[in-house]
Amino acid sequence: MPETFNSALPGEQQSIRRGAWVDALPEPGSVVVRVGDSASLLRDLAPESVDCVITSPPYWGHRDYSAGGIGQEPTVQGYVEALLSVFEPLQKALKPTGSFWLNLGDTYRSKRLQGIPWRVAIAMVDEQDWILRNDVIWNKVKGSPDNAKDKLRNLHEHIFHFVKDPKKAYYDVDAIRRPPRAATERNGKVQSATGVSGTRYRRQIELSTVLSETEKVAAMSALDEMMQSVKAGEISDFRMVIRGVHRVTHSDSVRLSGRAKELADRGFYFLKYHPKGAKPSDIWEIIPEDTHGREAHYAAYPEALCEIPIQATCPPDGLVLDPFLGTGTTLVVAKRLGRRALGIDISKEYAAIAEARIKEVA
Ligand SMILES: C[S@@+](CC[C@H](N)C(=O)[O-])C[C@H]1O[C@@H](n2cnc3c(N)ncnc32)[C@H](O)[C@@H]1O
């Protein structure tokens, strides 16, 4: 076993029995940092005890972390194997309802982009039966300077969302919806947040040469009902698709699409927006935090990157794990959101920085 300096936060040092880390984390918001090699320390965790893992392993061959560890393998294949040797005990420690969010960046070798994120993801699916639910593109918006004259600037990384069992996986979609803007009412006329007042649709129905008179009457009355639902706050917004005016959103084939059939049979249909707001997409625009002030470490990910994973896939009383803790960003956010959390890093130096940051969270 490598050295296992344990510390428990807040405050006092705790001696944690082998195999009993989870017992040592009873309070919501309590956080533990351990120093050592994740591949070996994760075996100490009680099986099926972790709700949500969020992590960014070292890039392959990019950076020289203070205590070595993963990333220095001579081949890409060796790097993928080293990561999988950590993900195997991690998978055992994850609950059947659990989620694993993995942030990976790519690397060039002799001008060749290595495709590292997908190599790792495919190996996880093929060799360890992980189920991939999303490939989130993290658009970093502002990148580091790139003077290469023969390629584009690299501005994105991947965040893969894996689960053990998609039927059992915990997912609180309402916790991550962006609240819709409310409808407004002026001179007795309702207008949805995106400006839908019904006037334009009404005119399109009236002027239609494709709808029959009966269909026009039905479309007008359905539109009135929809505006009432907006007014009552039952839906936040909608779009109306009218035969001969708009195209079907997915497929024109009546055989393939229920909507195409509805359009053919009735002459119109509605696309209703969820009253609690829209789900975030799989493209996240998050500017990396400025870590120049932090001398020891320069690959911290932004706190915002951990928010959706924790809110959606860690229950309020759940346990978050980061096996490549670095400066502790995951645990800072977990503590702020009232979750229990534990982090592992091979470097004593980074673990100390992480502890200091976590202590600052009220
Ligand atoms: C990219 S950094 C993590 C950055 C982190 N997300 C943050 O916001 O600060 C990767 C970390 O993994 C650690 N590491 C490398 N190999 C390790 C291993 N075998 N076990 C535990 N930690 C390891 C490194 O010391 C480094 O701090």
Image (cartoon, rainbow, N blue to C red):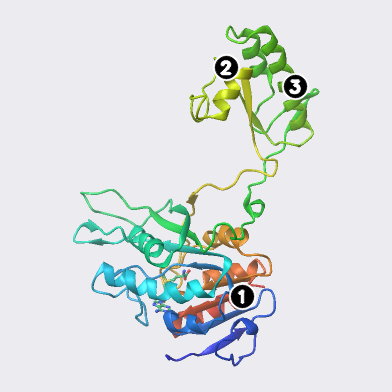
The residue that label 3 is drawn on is 224
- Residue drawn at (57%, 17%) of the image: 243
Q: Determine crowd level at label 3: few under 14, some 14-19, many 20+ residues with C-alpha closer than 10 A.
A: some
- Residue 204 point in image, percent of width and height: 62, 13
Please name the amino acid that badge 1 sits on. Glu
Tell me the mark number nearer the camera, choosing from 3 and 1: 3
Which mark sits nearer the N-terminus, 1 or 2?
2
Q: Quadrant of ligand 1?
A: bottom left
Please name the amino acid that badge 2 sits on. Arg
Q: In which quarter of the image is the N terminus?
A: bottom left
- Residue 97 point in image, percent of width and height: 59, 64
Q: In which quarter of the image is the C terminus?
A: bottom right
Please name the amino acid that badge 3 sits on. Asp
- The answer to whether residue 347 of the structure is visible from this angle is no
Secondary structure of the residue carrying numbered label 3: helix
In the image, 70 versus 189, the foreground residue is: 70
Q: In this view, does 243 lie above or below 330?
A: above
Q: Residue 242 lies in what quarter of the image?
A: top right
Secondary structure of the residue carrying numbered label 1: helix
- The answer to whether residue 264 of the structure is visible from this angle is yes
In the image, 299 versus 14, the foreground residue is: 14
The residue that label 2 is drawn on is 243
Question: Gap in Å between the C-alphas at discs 1 and 2?
Answer: 59 Å
Tag 1–tag 2 contact (CB < 8 Å): no
